[in-house]
Image (tube, rainbow, N blue to C red):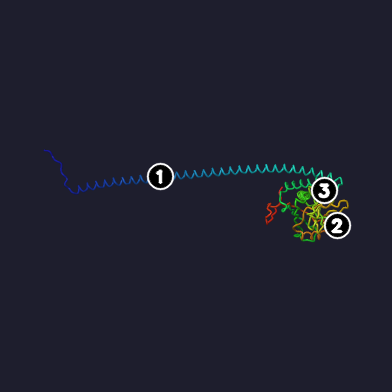
Amino acid sequence: MMQLPRCNNNPSDSRNYDDNEKDSKVRRQTNKRLGRVLMTVGGLVAMGLLISAGQGFSTKNRLRQQQALVLEEEKHHQMELKLKLEVEAEERERHKVALEEKTAVFDKIVREVRTIKGTGVIMETDPKSLEVTGRLKVAARELCKTKYGDYIDQKPYRLAVTIQYQNDQFSQEEQGGHFVIEMAPLSLQPYSVYNFMEVARGHHTDASGSGFHRKAGHVLQATMSSDFAKKPLAFQEYSKDYPHKKRTVGYCGRPSGGGGCWYISTMDNTQNHGPGSQQQKNPHEADANFGKVISGYEVVVPKIRQSMPKEGFLSDRSDWVLITDMTILVPANNDPNDEDNLYVEWKA
């Protein structure tokens, strides 16, 4: 007899089966959601990694670009600097050639003038002499402008003069003095100005041979030790528009300027050193004037007089008031409306 399977009529078993089915379904759904979450998180992480990598690449790229830009700018700067140096070298060479050419012209005319001067002719009225000295003035003016700078007449060159008193009348703090000479306009006294600029340029800094060595009622006379312009002037350059007034500075001697001899006029010396003075032959001949003291006169002139022990020429150099330095000054700019009127040291 066939035995039929028993039927489970226990309600609790049925509930257990249903619960298990539900739990299994919930677990499956939970796992699916967890899987989706993990996939999403993984995607986000991967995306973040990609973004970070992209940002890193972008930063590195920017750095490379910045470095390339810096290198390019430095290369451009070096090229500009090289070009500037080349231009400056070319300019120096052109200036050197121009200076040599103008010096040669100047020296040639000076020799020509000296030859005429040696004949004894009155150069101030002789047509040939006037023509040649006229050319010398032009050559001196051009040479001076090329060497020391081309400035308008309203801004002439200047010289800062430093002196030293040697006696015990003044304290240690008062042993030194300063004054400033403003040179005559190149339109009036070009040859005289250029000559003394050369004297100043070649002044010996040891000052052993430079100083005020003569005290007279109308002048304080000095001599200069210099490497340049040692000879007297080729002719007595003079302008009625720049006479020997008080505070002017001129060359002493006939012919003027030999050995760097010059003086400060402490009174109006138009009669003493102007046309027809100091000789009988030539009513037109005068000492050459080249500038005037524009600063320090009221202080240094009395002290120089006080320091020098006696009138006349002083043979003992310990009695001199030494000239320890001469500095050439040129305008800071060429603007006639510049109220400051600043000057700077000239550089060769």
Residue, x 82% and y 48% (percent of image)? 235
In this view, the residue in front, 340 or 154, is 154
Report which residue position mark 2 lands on. 312
Three-letter amino acid code at disc 3?
Phe
Three-letter amino acid code at disc 1?
Met
- Disc nearer the start of the sequence (2/3): 3
SS state under label 2: strand
Three-letter amino acid code at disc 2?
Gly
In this view, the residue in front, 131 or 216, is 131
Residue, x 85% and y 57% (percent of image)? 312
Which part of the image, by quadrant, shows the N terminus? top left
The label number, if any, that marks residue 47 in the structure image: 1
Label 2 Cα neighbours within 10 Å, binned few <14 / some 14-19 / many ≥20: some
Marks 2/3: CA distance?
Answer: 27 Å
SS state under label 1: helix
Q: Nearer the viewer, mark 1 or mark 3?
A: 3
> Where is residue 294, by image quadrant?
bottom right
> How far from the left and from the top, in percent, is residue 342?
69, 55
Report which residue position mark 3 lands on. 235
Describe residue 30's horizontal placement relative to residue 88 as left or right.
Answer: left
The label number, if any, that marks residue 232 in the structure image: none
Label 1 Cα neighbours within 10 Å, binned few <14 / some 14-19 / many ≥20: few
Marks 1/2: CA distance?
Answer: 104 Å
Residue at the far top in the pictured view: 1
Q: Nearer the viewer, mark 1 or mark 2?
A: 2
- Disc nearer the start of the sequence (1/3): 1
- Disc nearer the start of the sequence (1/2): 1
